């Protein structure tokens, strides 16, 4: 794998990967609809709207693998989700098929399964239960990836990322937290694995409260190193009082499950 395309490169996780993957592959092609820092050594910077099919064809040309992070990363109106996440992800897979890209990491989300209750243990075979239109769009992306593997052999790891931030922001994130270091290591495992096939991976660190079992993704070889326990004394965590019948507490998707519909 010598040229890796990262979509969503101007976003939080795109910036994390830009730094952590620097120098590890021949070329990082960094893309976003938003502004990015100029290209450094071993980098190419390409501004592109994922909803523009022709621009995405050109963007993907010459790439060996794609880390597809770009899109609307929280709940929004259907029109916004449609262009950024549904059309955008379709354009990426079509471009991959036409340009011969063999492997993709799709940044899915815990919100594809967010209506499972907190006491439910999930693995890669668990039913999708999206908690938002955003979660529905991630479910679409996962199914699209499954289809492009079965029909065209394009490998994908659909990573159902939990909460990838510097530190957990509330009690729920003690279970869903994914450290930047563990995230970057997971991305490298997906790029470097002998075979990914079609895989679903839950993106959480080695936290004490666990909802997700990654044994069915053991072939990817990712072993998270960090734990949210180091933050258990943080006032946002230790001081919080959570009612067990509050939908934001009952469901794995937290506030996304409790929120109303975003009108167009
Ligand atoms: P972010 O919102 O910081 O970054 C997303 C980037 O996508 C932005 O820079 C934005 O400009 C770009 N983008 C949006 N629409 C676009 C379009 N039409 N064309 C081109 N680029 C477009 O999100 P973050 O936190 O970096 O997340 C990255 C990915 O991981 C997203 O797909 C998100 O849904 C997913 N994810 C992130 C989680 C987290 O905890 N950070 C949790 C679960 C999933
Ligand atoms: C996500 O999918 C979002 O992109 C992120 O901003 C967080 O809200 C995260 O899920 C979460 O569930 O904590």
Image (cartoon, rainbow, N blue to C red):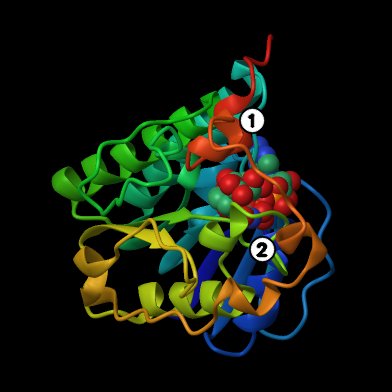
Task: Classify residue 143 by image quadrant.
Answer: top left
Residue at the left extreme of this rendering: 150
Q: Indicate the position of residue 91 as horizontal and vertical percent values.
A: 47, 38
Callouts 1 and 2 close, C-beta under 8 Å:
no
In the picture, which quadrant includes the N terminus?
Answer: bottom left
Q: Is mark 2 within 8 Å of ligand 1?
A: yes
Q: Is residue 186 left or right of residue 142?
A: right
Q: Indicate the position of residue 195 as horizontal and vertical percent values.
A: 21, 73
Task: Classify 10 Å Cα crowding around label 1: few (below 14), some (14-19), many (20 and above).
Answer: many
Q: Is residue 31 above or below residue 230?
A: above
Q: Is residue 213 left or right of residue 38?
A: left
Along the line of sight, the residue nearer the viewer: 19 or 91: 19
Residue at the bottom extreme of this rendering: 23
What secondary structure is found at the residue carrying circle 1? loop
Along the line of sight, the residue nearer the viewer: 45 or 70: 70
Q: Indicate the position of residue 257 as horizontal and vertical percent values.
A: 54, 29
Task: Classify residue 245 by image quadrant.
Answer: top right
For the residues marked 1 and 2, what is the alpha-carbon distance in whole angstroms? 19 Å
Task: Classify 10 Å Cα crowding around label 2: few (below 14), some (14-19), many (20 and above).
Answer: many
| Residue pictured at 42% horizontal, 38% vertical | 112
What secondary structure is found at the residue carrying circle 2? helix
Counting residues from the N terminus, which is met first, the one under dot 1 or under dot 2?
2
| Residue pictured at 32% horizontal, 38% vertical | 144
| Residue pictured at 45% horizontal, 79% vertical | 224
Q: Is residue 132 visible?
A: yes
Report which residue position mark 1 lands on.
Answer: 75
Mark 1 or 2: in front is 1
Q: Indicate the position of residue 6 as horizontal and vertical percent values.
A: 58, 62
Picture disc at residue 14: 2
């Amino acid at each position: 794998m010598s040229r890796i395309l990262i979509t969503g490169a101007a976003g939080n996780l795109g910036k994390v990967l830009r730094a952590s993957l620097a120098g590890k592959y021949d070329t990082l092609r960094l893309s976003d609809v938003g502004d990015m820092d100029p290209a450094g050594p071993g980098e190419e910077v390409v501004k592109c709207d994922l909803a523009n099919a022709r621009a995405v064809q050109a963007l993907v040309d010459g790439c060996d693998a794609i880390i597809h992070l770009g899109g609307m990363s929280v709940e929004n109106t259907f029109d916004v989700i449609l262009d950024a996440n549904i059309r955008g992800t379709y354009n990426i897979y079509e471009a991959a098929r036409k340009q011969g890209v063999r492997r993709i990491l799709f940044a899915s989300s815990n919100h594809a399964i967010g209506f499972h209750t907190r006491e439910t243990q999930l693995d890669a075979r668990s039913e999708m239960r999206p908690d938002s239109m955003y979660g529905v769009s991630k479910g679409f992306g996962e199914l699209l990836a499954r289809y492009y593997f079965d029909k065209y052999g394009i490998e994908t790891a659909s990573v159902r990322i939990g909460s990838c931030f510097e530190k957990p922001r509330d009690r729920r994130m003690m279970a869903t937290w994914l450290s930047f270091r563990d995230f970057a290591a997971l991305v490298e495992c997906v790029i470097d694995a002998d075979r990914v096939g079609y895989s679903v991976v839950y993106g959480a660190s080695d936290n004490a409260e666990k909802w997700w079992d990654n044994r069915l993704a053991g072939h990817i070889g990712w072993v998270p190193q960090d734990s949210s326990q180091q933050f258990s004394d943080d006032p946002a965590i230790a001081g919080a009082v959570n009612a067990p019948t509050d939908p934001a507490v009952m469901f794995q998707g937290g506030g996304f499950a409790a929120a109303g519909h975003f009108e167009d």
